[in-house]
Image (cartoon, rainbow, N blue to C red):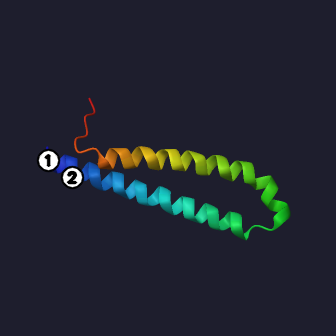
Amino acid sequence: PSDLDEQDEQDLSQSYEASSESIRSASYVLLKQPQELKSDLHDEVIAKLDKNIIVEQELKQQLSSPAHTST
């Protein structure tokens, strides 16, 4: 069972890395957009970022909590 826990931790940190990466690339895209495109895409991208940030916070909590008590 301890092997499983370790695997879970790995999966969690991988998806955490992935979400951080997508936040970085989304922010980068936002910065690179010409001004007139920005306003169109802004709400959509911000919504995606908000979702990612929430997911990140949840992942952080899961990673920092010593025991994964999921039934």
Identify the residue position indicated by label 2 in the image. 6
Residue occupying the point 41% across, 55% down: 16
Would you say 49 lies left or right of 7 here?
Answer: right
Question: Furthest-top residue in view?
Answer: 71
- Binning the other alpha carbons within 10 Å of mark 2 as few (below 14), some (14 to 19) or many (20 upward) gives few
Residue occupying the point 56% across, 59% down: 23
Q: Position of residue 41 (x, y in %)?
A: 75, 54
Question: Furthest-right residue in view?
Answer: 36
Amino acid under disc 2: Glu
User: Do the CB atoms of the residues marked 2 and 1 lie less than 8 Å apart?
Assistant: yes
Residue occupying the point 63% across, 63% down: 27
Q: Position of residue 39 (x, y in %)?
A: 81, 55
What separation in Å lies between label 2 and label 1 (alpha carbons)?
6 Å
Q: Considering the numbered disc 1 on the image, is that residue within a helix, a strand or a loop?
A: helix
Q: Which mark is residue 26?
A: none
**How many numbered callouts?**
2
Amino acid under disc 1: Ser
Q: Quadrant of the N terminus?
A: top left
Relative to 71, residue 31 above or below: below
Q: Which quadrant would residue 32 be assigned to in this image?
A: bottom right
Q: Position of residue 15 (x, y in %)?
A: 41, 54
Q: Which quadrant would residue 25 be assigned to in this image?
A: bottom right
- Binning the other alpha carbons within 10 Å of mark 1 as few (below 14), some (14 to 19) or many (20 upward) gives few
Q: Which mark is residue 2?
A: 1
Would you say 34 lies left or right of 3 here?
Answer: right
Q: Position of residue 22 (x, y in %)?
A: 54, 60
Q: Quadrant of the C terminus?
A: top left
